[in-house]
Image (cartoon, grey):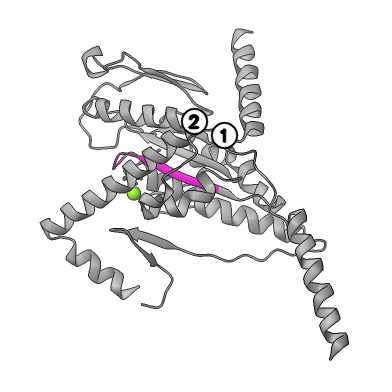
Amino acid sequence: GYQRVLEENRKLYNHVQDLKGSIRVYCRVRPFLPGQPNSVSTVGHLDEGSISIITPLKYVKDGRKSFTFNKVFGPSATQEEVFSDTQPLIRSVLDGYNVCIFAYGQTGTGKTHTMTGPKELTQKSVGVNYRALSDLFLISEQRKNTISYEVSVQMIEIYNEQIRDLLATDDLAGSERVDKSEAVGDRLKEALHINKSLSALGDVISSLAQKNSHVPYRNSKLTQLLQDSLGGQAKTLMFVHISPEPDAAGETISTLKFADRVSTVELGAARVNKDGADVKELKEQIANLKAALARKE
Ligand code: ADP
Ligand code: MG
């Protein structure tokens, strides 16, 4: 009985968040990996919507160890389960919404696993990206007699504050770059740039959460690219990843605190992409002027 009330409450809360247009946050805990030394997980309590971390209090300055998110996936959650909670959001693309899904977390916590999948890709192991595309194609196939959809793909990488088009015909430049960045100096530069993007992301989230009139999107390429998704009318979901290792507890807590801040950001209510009244009016004016010009000639 009590569990059901909690579950109903969570659903209602998610629904209200949806209406308010907040950034949804799903938390995923990765399992211990084969070959890792056996240790006790830092995750104490975990249910569908909340998680608490076990760590000595001295590592948590404010004593905060429990967090509530839209959804929490434990270490045994499958790729299919994760996708099925993401599917409705993805399908709203077909209703004209912009949807943004991104993964956040310390290196090795499972971002690539969630979004792409593990090295060996099977039908069972593929991640959200593949599943999203095949779902969209499936639906558009089903609706093909009534609606036609156009799909285009862009893949870009931000590397050291430079935006690169990964589908551009020069991808060779990419492999050269990987070789070069083995140098210690390049690794350091890389790390500094990543830190810069992440702190810019943190600053943007803080200003949005505080409803500041100025939001510093232009401080990094990452926040510039995400501007429409973080502050606009998009439906946005962040997967926050943590590992169960006690060694990572400090990082885990700060990741969860960041995620907590993200989930308090209220966006404008998500809006369908279509010509607003003013655009329609302007289009009409243009058409009238063109017609007038044509009559003059
Ligand atoms: P990140 O992209 O965050 O650096 P990865 O996705 O590469 O991390 O994950 C690190 C390792 O953990 C990989 O070997 C990955 O396959 C494995 N892993 C991550 N999440 C899971 C999971 N939920 N179940 C099983 N293995 C996982
Ligand atoms: Mg990765």
Mark 2 residue element: helix
Q: What's the amino acid at mark 2?
A: Ser
Ligand 1 neighbours mark 2 (CB distance < 8 Å)? no
Q: Is 201 displayed left or right of 94 in the figure?
A: left
Range shown magenta: 100-108
Vertical arrangement, residue 280 with respect to residue 43, above or below: below
Front residue of this view, candidates 148 and 273: 273
Residue 101 part of the magenta-drawn span: yes
Secondary structure under the numbered disc 1 in the rendered image: loop
The numbered mark, 1 or 2, whose residue comes first in the sequence reads 1
The reply to whether discs 1 and 2 touch (Cβ–Cβ < 8 Å) is: yes
Q: Which quarter of the rendered picture does the C terminus lie within?
A: bottom right
The residue under the point 59% across, 12% down is 3
Residue 15: x and y in percent read 66, 28
Residue 115 picture location, percent across and down? 45, 48
Q: Main secondary structure of the magenta part?
A: strand
The residue positioned farthest toward the front in the image shown: 296
Q: Which image quadrant for residue 267?
A: top right
Q: What's the residue at 55%, 33% (across, down)? A: 266
Q: Which amino acid, mark 1?
A: Ser
Q: Is residue 64 visible?
A: yes
* The label number, if any, that marks residue 22 in the structure image: 1
Q: Nearer the viewer, residue 84 or 183?
A: 183
Q: Report if residue 19 lies within the magenta region.
A: no
In depth, the one of 207 and 196 nearer the eye is 207
Q: Is residue 6 above or below residue 35?
A: above
